[in-house]
Image (tube, rainbow, N blue to C red):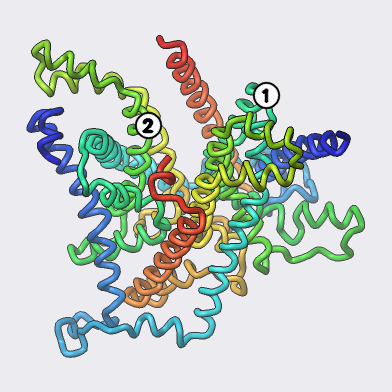
Amino acid sequence: MSSQRFLAFGLRFYVVVFFAYLFLPLLIMAAATFNDSRFPTVTPWDGTTLRWFGELAADGGMWQALGNSLVVAAGVLVVAVPIGIATALFLNTVSSRAKPFLYALILSPLLTPGVIIGISTLIFWRQFGVSGGIFLTVLGQATFIAAYVMLMVTARLQRFDRTLERAALDLGASPWQAFRRILLPYLKPALYSAAVIAFLQSFENYNTTLFVVGYDTTLTVYIASKVRTGLTPAVNALGLILILITVAVAVVYELKRRREAARVVEGV
Amino acid sequence: MFRQLQVRFGGPLAMAIVTLLGIWLIVMVTLPQLQMIEYSLKPNLLPAQIGGPEDRLTLANYATLFNNDIHRAIFLKTLWSSVLVTLLTLAVSYPLAWYLAKVATPRQAALCILLLIVPFWINEILRTYSWFIILAFRGPLNEVLMMLGLIERPIRFLSGNGGVMVGMVYAYILFMVFPLYNAIESLDDNQVRAARDLGAGTLRTHRRIVIPHAKPGIATGCIMTFMLAAGSYAVPALLGSPGSRWFTQIIYNWFFEGGNWNQGAAYAFLLLVLCIGFMSLVMKVFKVGLGDIGR
């Protein structure tokens, strides 16, 4: 029995260590923002300062990159969300012997390394005279983000009660009306979640973007190039701001999702 | 297939669905991949030579890898290191997934999952960068180790493969934890209790009951982690050095420094083959299908 107790204690200890491992690096990075040292570190502590936020705000390249990132993310939403919805509707409706093959093809962008999606997009569009830039970044990212959208829409679609749709059709609604009034409102929460995830995936993407971005730097590419050349704690200031925004969005999203899940359980 | 769509959604909408799906699968997924393969089979020619006698299919770009000792070594290192990263990540994630799924109370589990999701949402570059600060020559890890008297002089963590591996386990751990958690969670508690009542110890219960049940989760986690590790560019670029290059960095150099896209395409295709090979192997060993992965 005591060995069982010991194991249970060990497991709890392990969980604590695991979460320390998960958060300590982020805390150290955040702390380094406020260190008045030319190089980002926490040892030695050269005094507390806020000046790196000022330096960050004065960095024109950062603002340019942020603008590009937002344009790309908006483009990805426009391309990937409709494709993801269409694919989910297709998989939910069609039964055919070709379906397992199509399903494998649909999932393949998720199982392909991001660099390869970037490379193949870059090569394919060269023959049409299109070189790396915002347009190709949107296409490259949307290639795999559409698959994420598909998975999220499919998850909700699988719980849809199709008798509702049939009732609408029997009562004289056109297929378009049934889609517009019954299915689309039902899918709405999943569409919002998918849009949030698609935006974040696009904003954070590095591997695919690196190959297709050309000279239009996005924020993630900008951060990576700063880390390798000309590193100052201004990068930490940017990181800290991004982390705070991300955490806020993540918490709101997760709480909303849980409320939604609780509603489903209660049958409301 | 179109008929089924038409009956449910009507002609115009069915048309739109098929068009969007077609554009995605053909123009964005399939054709670019095929074009990449075709590129990899052609020599790197000047525009004037295209269509000329030298413009023919060849395996020369693939032979480069086998003839270049350094590139071959880096390819093999990428393979073994990615396998190692995958195994390490599995070992680190399993106890946590078990705790979340079967030991923690629902409230504890909900809190832990929220805590897990938060870093998951944070940019991979930033997560990697945080390790760059920790592992720096004059960074906090060296300071702490010296303060404890464990080392005399600071260690250059950022010059070998060690830093890259630590950074990768950190960056991709959640792609392992969640599939494992989902798989273990669906195991009936009674099975674990029955095993215990029949006298199985902790190890045996896991080996005979939990792990066989969690196979699809283990397979999914391993496939995702390996693919992310082998295809990683950010982690080796930030935490490695010229002496610890990753295969993706060689590919990048062919494109943007060597200016030989054909050669780069061949290397990219080899990386893809590596990932597909690993995936097939794992699916075969664990006897799971693609349907288990999409969940």
Drawn side of residue B79 relative to residue A215, left or right: right
**From mark 1 to mark 2, how far is it between C-alphas?**
26 Å
Where's the C terminus of chain B, which quadrant? top left
Q: Quadrant of residue B192?
A: top right
Instruction: Report the residue marked by disc 2.
Output: A155
Instruction: Report the residue marked by disc 1.
Output: B105
Q: Is residue A231 visible?
A: no
Say few, some or many: other residues with alpha carbon within 10 Å of mark 2 (under 14 / 14 to 19 / 20 or more).
few
As drawn, B184 above or below B271: above
Give the structural element (helix, strand or loop) at label 2: helix
**Residue drawn 46% across the image and 55% down it:** B283
Amino acid on which the number 2 mark rests in the picture: Ala
Task: Out of A87 and A6, give the one closest to the viewer.
Answer: A6
**Residue drawn 86% across the image and 39% down it:** A3
Residue A183 % position (x, y): 24, 22
All told, the count of numbered labels is: 2
